[in-house]
């Protein structure tokens, strides 16, 4: 399996001017690795736990030693909007953006726990057949990944198979980070809707004796609205 830095880093490096929709885990990873260039420059995309540590460590250095990157880590890039706290809504949000901006690629970085809440979203996407939509799901079999890693209701759910049967033009499962890096530009260029199930290792959990959950900053409760306004302005400037 690949790690979450590989899964998100490939997208950050290769999405270009595509609009990106992310759910919570991916949101936090993109916050750390994208920086002001939006391409995860300098972040190594290596497999395994060592690759995860190296990738997140390098991303943290970027935010600590660069004021610009630190600012980017406190908010999303203008071309990204996060479906948080709209759990289960990433597919619908991505679909709306794809239909409103048919000339622009839209990449959804969904999660297994989130998508399981709104599986009907797959049928809604298929009904509209957005040619510019790429729908990815991070499949790690857990909820609250990196905290307690609670197993999802169906950890072995076959998302790509379900998407294929629902009517996505193309659906596949990818387990290897190097293969994902190779396949991403080809999949992004395909006529959609395209579905990709990414098999990702859970982030090691933090919950143990003495663990205390940090309080979320206030902007986590307002950032989706702020991102919507920033995205609207970005569309106007890049029409």
Image (cartoon, rainbow, N blue to C red):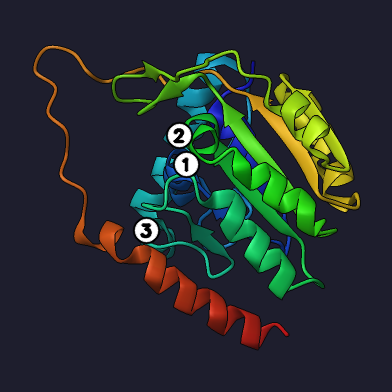
* Residue drawn where x is 47% and y is 54% of the image: 83
Q: Name the quadrant containing residue 130.
A: bottom right
Instruction: Say which residue label 1 marks.
Output: 29
* Residue at the spot of label 3: 70
What residue is drawn where x is 44% and y is 38%? 25
The reply to whether callout 2 and callout 1 are in contact (CB within 8 Å) is yes
Numbered disc 1: secondary structure: helix
Q: Residue at (61%, 42%) from the top-left corner?
A: 120
Residue at far left of view? 210
C-alpha separation, residue under disc 1 versus residue under disc 3: 14 Å
**Residue shown at 71%/62% (left/top)?**
18
Residue that mark 2 sits on: 56
Q: Nearer the viewer, residue 141 or 77?
A: 141
Spatial distance from mark 3 to mark 2, Cα to Cα? 14 Å
112 w.r.t. 32: above or below: above
**Rendered location of residue 212, percent (x, y):** 12, 28
Mark 2 to mark 1 CA distance (whole Å): 8 Å
Q: Nearer the viewer, mark 1 or mark 3?
A: 1
Q: Assign a secondary structure to mark 2.
A: helix
Instruction: Decide if residue 101 is on the left or right side of residue 237.
Output: right
Residue 13 visible in the displayed image: no
Sequence-wise first label, 1 or 3 = 1
């Amino acid at each position: 399996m690949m790690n979450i830095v590989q899964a998100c880093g490939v997208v950050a490096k290769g999405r270009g001017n595509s609009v990106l929709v992310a759910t919570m885990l991916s949101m936090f990873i993109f916050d750390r690795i994208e920086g002001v260039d939006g391409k995860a420059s300098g972040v190594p995309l290596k497999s395994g736990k060592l690759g995860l540590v190296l990738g997140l460590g390098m991303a943290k250095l970027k935010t600590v030693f660069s004021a610009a990157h630190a600012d980017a880590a406190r908010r999303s890039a203008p071309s990204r909007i996060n479906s948080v706290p709209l759990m289960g809504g990433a597919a619908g949000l991505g679909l709306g953006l794809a239909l409103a901006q048919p000339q622009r690629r839209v990449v959804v970085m969904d999660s297994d726990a989130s998508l399981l809440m709104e599986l009907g979203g797959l049928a809604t996407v298929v009904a509209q057949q957005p040619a510019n939509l790429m729908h990815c799901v991070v499949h790690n079999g857990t909820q609250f990944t990196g905290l307690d890693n609670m197993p999802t209701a169906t950890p072995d759910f076959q998302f790509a198979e379900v998407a294929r049967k629902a009517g996505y033009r193309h659906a596949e499962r990818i387990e290897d980070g190097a293969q994902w890096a190779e396949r991403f530009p080809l999949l992004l260029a395909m006529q959609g809707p395209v579905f990709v199930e990414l098999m990702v290792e859970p982030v090691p959990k933090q919950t143990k004796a003495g663990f205390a959950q940090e309080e979320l900053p206030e902007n986590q409760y307002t950032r989706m609205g702020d991102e919507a306004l920033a995205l609207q302005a970005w569309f106007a400037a890049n029409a």
